[in-house]
Image: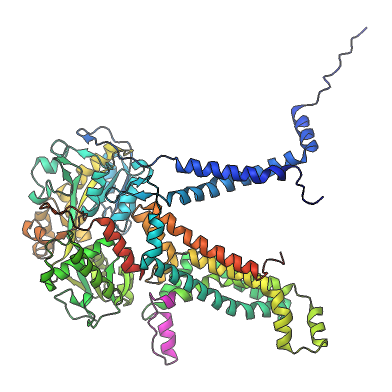
Amino acid sequence: MRGRKRGASRWARPAIMLGAAVMLLAAACGGGTEAKGGKVFDSVGKGEGKLSLIAWPGYVESGENDPKVDWVTPFQDQSGCQVSVKYANTSDEMVALMRQGGGKIYDGVSASGDATNRLIAHGDVAGVDVQKLIDAYKNQEIMPALQSPGHNTVDAVHYGVPYMWGVNFLMYNTEKVQKPSSWDITFEPSSPYAGNITAYDSPIYIADAALYLKAHQPDLGITDPYELTQAQFDASVDLLKQQAGMVRKYWAVYTDEIDAFKTGDLVAGTAWPVNLSLLLADGQPVDAVIPSEGVTGWADTWMMSSNAPHPNCMLQWMQWTTKADIQAQVAEYYGATPSNSASCDQLRTDLGEEADTVYHCGDQDFLKAIALWKTPQADCGNGRNDCMDYSKWTEAWTAIRGA
Amino acid sequence: MATVVARDSRPGLRRRFSAALYRRPGLKLVFLLLPPLAWMVVVYLGSLSLLFVSSFWRVDPFTSAIVHRWGLDNFKTILTEPAFRATAVRTAGIAAAVTVTDVLLAFPIAYYAARLATPRVRNALLVAVVLPLWSNYLVRVFAWRTILAEGGLADSFLGLIGLPGVRLGFTNWAVWIAFCYLWLPFVILPIYVALERIPRSLLEASGDLGARPWTTFRDVVFPLAFPGVVAGSIFAFSLTLGDYITPSLVGNTRFIGNVIFEFVGVSGNVPIAAAYGLVPVAIMAVYLFVARRLRAFEAL
């Protein structure tokens, strides 16, 4: 008989529709994410046996890349905390990873200044009493500029310990590119290397464009490349949109840049010190300069999650990584500069005058001249509230990359 | 006199359950379908509906926490911002180009394998078509990256025959080539199956009625193979539409998937990612509707 549904199929359709409605309702009423409270750790207990970290590649070496480069195994032997690392490519990734699972998956992160304040504001990271727990602070070894910087110390609470700092310099292929002195070979359309340039694939790269315009279009009045008014921001974005036609490949994964320099697809562009170190170790003809307009850079902090599953191991890791000899080891492998000025003696012994000319170890003035990564906010000080905040940077970056 | 104790004549629980199912076939069907249906509804549809609902919410700009304030802002953004439109158009455009190219490449191979090859050659050809799928997706994509790199295999080969190197590394051409290669087996196989089912007698009858080979192909072979072509094209189109790994490895471009990945994995902005994720859903709905109108599914 047509038109008459029998048995199960009669109630199947209404049941499915009811189920779908219930599901949508349940999804809509689901709980959202909430900020957590702020603890301050002032004592270290027994290690929990494990430690899971989020880090920039090259920051947590356990001998896998180079058997002679290992500052993790001695830590594991001493503390009993087995270390596992998740490498992240951008600060945004680090923030997202840190917040996964309510902050209970990873114990700590080596956050740069453009991630730290976001993590602090959202309650993702815990305070640490550095004067009580960290020897490098007790012995006054940390560089003064990095003892209580705004990017990791808020309302006199320290939210981590300083690790390495460094620059995003201009790396170039010495066989194909004449030694540059300015970023113009990466920004000007008349550059002879257009089509083989690279740029960092993250919204924070807009600051590099702003830094370039600070020198080349002074009438825009840019002072801080992270505090940009609408006009300054639009000019930077226009520069980047025009640069997009010259860029062969944007890199976020550091091996992308290394591989492309090896094959010759890229000949010049912004790079991290570790990229240069690894290419040089491979015998590639590359070098890097700090151009006349200046550079952006980063000062990284080891921060601990508010809900860290292994807080004692994390605190021991913070103590370990602020030691002068450990920071010197990291510096020599990665190419960044230690925050612990007591490391400079060892760097000078191992590297000679490079410790001062290349690493600028202990050089406060050089550190202050770098435009360190920080989170752009609408509040740019002096009562003005008209700067572009990071969500605008992200939208603009999508526009630059999506066109 | 011994008392005979009667055994309890009620059957066991399993027996009673089995009998109940026998009496009610509808109930049997429910138990059979419940596990896969539950997985489908709870895991798949449930997560999709959560995603759909979250596309109406938004995110606090500084702390990146999801705020449950309802609104159509996300949809307005993705429809008006030129970058989102450009990305969607580019993704659909490359997907269409990959589909057309793959169908043009797959049809002759499938036709040869189905109708012209001897059984041994046919088996060898089918193995050859499926062989790349035995290796990992990433390995194949990285292989193309190496081939198309500056001074890589492509350039060396062209240099051997005297042509200048093509600077294809990290361009949209490279993405198109890589996708054509990746999905070709998925397009060849449905067309092969459809062509194999055509009975020889139809072709002979067409010839008897006076049709030239091209007419036979146009009026007999192709309409019968069309469902296979559409099935293969759905593979090529939908797989390209949703992919984000190949564009980021061999190209310098962003697909819909890359933008969604950035929003979720990097900015934590799930609402707008969910809204943008509805774009490929809409595109595929249109594609399948058109395929249905072209009567591609009637053979099923």
What is the residue that sits farthest to the top in this orientation? B1
Look at the image and tell me in which quarter the C terminus of chain A lies: bottom left
To which quarter of the image does residue A285 belong?
bottom left
Please state which of residues B248 and B62 is positioned toward the viewer in this rendering.
B62
Q: Where is residue A216 in the image (x, y as percent from the top left)?
A: 13, 73
- The residue at 79%/75% (across/down) is B199
- The residue at 46%/58% (across/down) is B277
What is the magenta range?
A: B152-174
Q: Is residue B264 left or right of residue B180?
A: left
Q: Is residue B54 left or right of residue B36?
A: left
To which quarter of the image does residue B107 belong?
bottom right
| B101 up-or-down from A78: above or below | below
- The residue at 23%/83% (across/down) is A192
Residue A64 in magenta stretch: no
Q: Position of residue B82 (x, y in %)?
A: 36, 68
Is residue B135 something one can see in this rendering?
Answer: no
Rendering colour mode = rainbow
